[in-house]
Image (cartoon, helix red, strand yellow):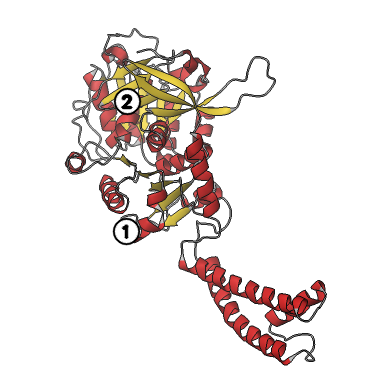
Amino acid sequence: MTVSSLSERRREDERGSALVDDGPRDRDDDGRGEHGAAGRYFVVIGTDMARRVCGSLQSAGHRVCHLGRPTDQELRAALDGEVAGVAILLDDDVESLRYALTTEHIRPNVPLVVTVFDRTVAEQLSRVVPNCRVTSPAEVAAPVLLAACLQPDLLALIPAYSRPAPDSDSDPAPCHLGARAEGDTVRLEPYRAPRSLRARAWFGKIRGQLRPHDGSSRIMLTGLAGILAVLLADWTWSVALRHRAPVEALFEAARTVATVGPAGTHGSDAYLVFSALAMLVTVVFTAVFTAGMVDRLLAPRSVGILGPRALPRGGHVVVVGLGQVGLRLCTELQGLGVGVIAVERDPAAPNLRLAKALGVPVVVADATDRFVLRRLGLHQAQAMAAVASDDRDNIAVSIASLAVAPELRLVMRAGDHDAIAETRSLFRIGPVHDLNTLSAAYTTATLSGLRPRTVLAHGRQLLLERPDGTFAPWPHSDRCTHPQDPDHTPSRETAASPAR
């Protein structure tokens, strides 16, 4: 497959240069020879995604030592010999960092592929270990999920940098490249969100200002609105009927709202009655405002009433699951000017604080509840992405969402479980993406020295973008047959030992 010359405008990833394999590579027309020369020895550490990488390497004729969470002695034994590469595929950044540094200490300069979610840790690891390629499922899958949320005819939206015109002195402006399938080719073109989508998103953000979704915020705004109404009514009476100066009228109105009475008692009987009633009503509104304010200050809040963290009311994307994948998708959508609402069930989720710092509005609720979904404005939403780590939760959220908004565009993160196929046979469920499959293909290609840029999913086919800007099919592989216990360390008979 070929790609337009626009792919040359993307920046080269310098970190992948240390992972190029000097050995021969067997290539064929269907892309199955992309695994590199057969018979090399690899060490893979991890569980589910590692099983896919292990199975892919084994199907290409390589020898693999698949470890769960090995001790330092077991890791040293596995690295004894000629090692073509090591993949550390764990969900815990601390464990991944420890194994990466231990591997570099035991076998300096061995090609490493490590999954790290935290960007700060990833940057430091790449700086300390130059021969390490750091990635994560969120980084690999974000372009595919982003495209599915915005336009169904896009395969991916890939972050890139556009170049200014030759006669322009301006710096390159950030943009995205959209990947589209055209027959047997994949075309990359600069992408800009359609004007209609950006207009809907902008109006949705405006409509969301001062429209809180939770009860305590509404109580607080009700009390504040009542106090301001009393203040305005008293000021208007004083200016229009008593002919007071505006500043003097404001002072007397403030005294009434503060329940200390007007400045003098020589006004008309009607005004005195009005002031008395206004002070009594203000006491009620003040209590309402104080109750709402205290509840909002004491309870953890990830949604704003005014500003960028206010819930949009139209043209937005609802992202269910605030893990690393969900948070990455939210920030990418915001970068394109699209409103977003994140939904997280766990009030103690570690990414809540980070989402608040990034300006992402988060609703802490159960997304399978139809009442919650209606409050999120699904009928006015652009799409919903169910990207929680549990496939069954994503299925449940998708079913509930279709019940609330049957025409809503759905994007679901899931695997190749039987439940997915059964659910698809019952109703239109939308694009389903297996993040482990995408990440496993990316990791396997990197271990083989290919330095892939992107992995796309087109129907049942995986497409791998090479460094030269061309796309090639990448085969699906079954999981390896090693035991699933993450603490089990296979013996040298189970996982073939390296050549001595």
Which of the two discs, 1 and 2, labels the residue nearer the N terminus? 1
Q: Nearer the viewer, residue 457 or 453?
A: 457
Q: Is residue 497 visible?
A: no
Residue 30, image x, y percentages: 26, 13
Element assignment for label 1: loop
Q: What label sits on residue 369 in the rendered view?
A: 1
Q: Which residue is mark 2?
A: 441
Residues at circles 1 and 2 in contact by the CB criterion of under 8 Å: no
Residue 359 location in percent, x, y? Answer: 54, 48
Residue 18 marker: none
Residue 9 higher or lower than 326, as above or below: above
x, y percentage for residue 395?
A: 26, 47
Is residue 22 depicted above or below 59 in this figure?
above
Please, is residue 114 above or below residue 333 in the view?
above
* Three-letter amino acid code at the position of disc 1: Asp
Residue drawn where x is 38% and y is 35% of the image:
145
Between residues 99 and 408, which one lies in front from this camera angle?
408
Disc 2 marks a residue whose amino acid type is: Ala
Q: Nearer the viewer, residue 249 or 478?
A: 249
